[in-house]
Image (spheres, helix red, strand yellow):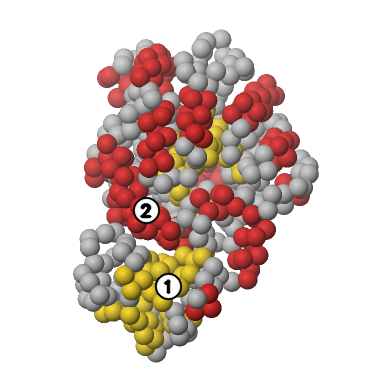
Amino acid sequence: MTDEATTPSQSTKAAKSAKSAKSTTKYEPTKESLGTHRPPQWFMDAKLGIFIHWGIYSVPAWAPIAKKQGLGQEYATMQEHMRNNPYAEWYLNSLRFKDGPYQKHHEEVYGKDFPYEKFADEFNESIKSWKPSNWAEFFQKIHAKYVVITSKHHDGFLLWPSEHPNPNPNLENYSASRDIIGELTDEVKAKGLKMGIYYSGVIDWSFDANVIDSGVSFINTGSTDQNYADYADAHWYELINKYKPSIVWNDIGYPHKGKMKEILAYYYNNFPDGVVNDRWDQSSNFVRNFVKFPGIKQLVNKGANSLFRKGMTAKKKIAFGDYLTPEYQVLEEIAPNKWESCRGLGQSFGYNQNETEEHYIAADELIRSFIDIVSKNGNLLINVGPKPDGTIPEPQIQRLTALGNWLDVNGEAIFETTPWQKASTTTNLGIDVRFTAKPGILYVHLLGIPKESQFIINDLNLEFGAKIEFLLDKSPVSWENQGANLKLNLPQKIPDTPAIVFKITLPTHL
């Protein structure tokens, strides 16, 4: 069956219109009320965000190299994965394996008695030379539309001068010596970008000394104490009120005694253009205890082992929040609701000194993956892992620069677009094709360069009067329907580029 190119469907238009209107709804702290919130139009249009993982784990900056990227690894069990975790920002948890590579590395480099929290001294000394304006300028240059930075990762170290400091008496001044969140927020907003804040809700290893090494221990991670829940609540209210983020990005889950629904209602009511991610799951004491029963424990751990062996898959439904956040994954089809793929440029989010060129995603692959994500109603939140002094490693700079250069030419086919009737097809030469759309316009992305001047795009027809131009130089492209397919005749040799885009202006809007 062929697809005749038309404007975006009425359902897509209606959804876009609904999302563009500022809600006057008064949100209540209930699942039903919060579930009616939808992402604002700016987030639907933004497509590209920058994730930043930066903290005292950036000082040791060490993790083993995995054979493949993402959460699915070569290890048979979750325990082995966690012992050899390729995420450098998980350094403290991995260090708690007494027989693991982290422990061996740590003792060899820093000594057996060197505590993790001492990395704060070097981090705070290093950040004196950090220039947030350089980051903001670079992110704007590569066409990112929003930035999300870790305010507190799983180790509990704070990147802002909180009025609610860590209460652990052994962790005095366990925070950055500069207001990293505030300074970066000012610079990012000054460049016209939206600012988002990440916070590790349920996991805080400064409150919980237990190692995460299985499915059951993962479910039971985090303090169940009311004091910690109050601490997390106070932080989110403080971050929201002080920095007014456009994105509230919580990770892993939230304390079951915390006021999660009240926080979200407060945020939605006070920031109509704000958007919230999906990682707010709460495990009650009943669930925590239930999974510890011998038979249940075995099943849960077996399931977790399978997930880490085969790779995580994105959940389809959101309990709380506005959009899905699959990690190192891309959905297979157009999603009816907004989603955001988050990933590092290498195998880790935090800076890992062991990563070399071969461990980073190739620039061409990054660009093609980005197009694929956008064609399926997604955004890409691509991560940078700076060094302690704020320097972004050169391989990361190179890949993001390549993405920015491609967007210099082809950005109109990405930003402010919607998915088309379908996400993909192929050419007769075996090149993958992706689609994006605007009213009256269809963009056809070829994820490769045709070796012939004439080629066919399968399962695509155009109406009489449609016009095609090569987006690179605006030159016209002749075409003809050939059965159920579309034949294109290229007027010139295509330059070397990861993907080329054809702009089709549809006749109903001529």
Rendered position, 135 above or below 488: above
CA gap between label 2 and label 1 equals 18 Å
Q: Position of residue 344 (x, y in %)?
A: 39, 42
List the residue tagged with mark 2.
407
| Residue drawn at x 41%, y 56% as measured from the top left | 411
360 displayed left or right of 161: left
Rendered position, 187 above or below 376: above
Q: Nearer the viewer, residue 271 or 75?
A: 271
| Residue drawn at x 51%, y 12% as measured from the top left | 173
| Residue drawn at x 46%, y 70% as measured from the top left | 442
| Residue drawn at x 23%, y 42% as measured from the top left | 357
Looking at the rendered structure, which numbered label has been put on residue 504?
1
- Disc 1 secondary structure class: strand
508 displayed left or right of 255: left
Q: Is residue 432 visible?
A: no
Q: Position of residue 353 (x, y in %)?
A: 28, 31
Q: Is residue 449 visible?
A: yes
Amino acid marked by disc 2: Leu
